Amino acid sequence: MNFEKKRSCRITSRQLETLVTFMEKHPEFSSGKLTPEMNKSTRKEMWEQLALQLNYDGWGPIKTADQWRKVCMTLLTNCMLLITLVLNKYQ
């Protein structure tokens, strides 16, 4: 697989659904907190596992585990920004 440093196409709705489902099934992973059970190496393995699931679809972009982590962080940031804007509008 060729993982050049360029922006790839947007993730598909199926990939987004897979990402959300994975995070719901693994709340200790999605929280981002390090614990004795969820250490750095375990988190890395889980990102690899998630990347395999997201890349398996065959329709969306293929990314490394680190690239998927960045996508997830961007989605989270955008959601938090949207929530803040909506809350500020109704206050």
Image (cartoon, helix red, strand yellow):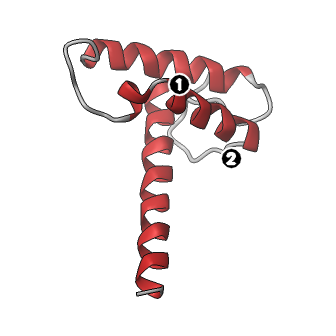
Q: Residues within 10 Å of mark 1 (few under 14, many from 20)?
A: few
Q: Which residue is outermost to the right?
A: 59
Give residue 3's position: percent from left, percent from top.
Answer: 55, 29
Q: Is residue 87 left or right of residue 10?
A: left
The three-letter code of the residue at mark 1 reads Lys
Give residue 63's position: percent from left, percent from top.
Answer: 58, 30
Res. 34 image quadrant: top left
Give residue 44's position: percent from left, percent from top.
Answer: 37, 18
Comes first in the chain, label 1 or label 2: 2
User: Circle 1 — which element?
Assistant: helix
For the point 42% across and 57% down, which residue is it? 77
For the point 64% across and 20% down, which residue is it? 53
For the point 60% across and 17% down, which residue is it? 52
User: What is the C-alpha distance between the residues marked 1 and 2?
Assistant: 26 Å
- Label drawn at residue 25: 1
User: Circle 2 — which element?
Assistant: loop
For the point 73% across and 42% down, which residue is it? 12
The three-letter code of the residue at mark 2 reads Cys
Q: Which residue is outermost to the front?
A: 91
Q: Is residue 49 left or right of residue 45?
A: right
The total of numbered circles placed on residues is 2
Q: Is 41 placed above or below 47 here?
A: above
Give residue 9's position: percent from left, percent from top.
Answer: 68, 47
Which residue position is annotated with label 2? 9
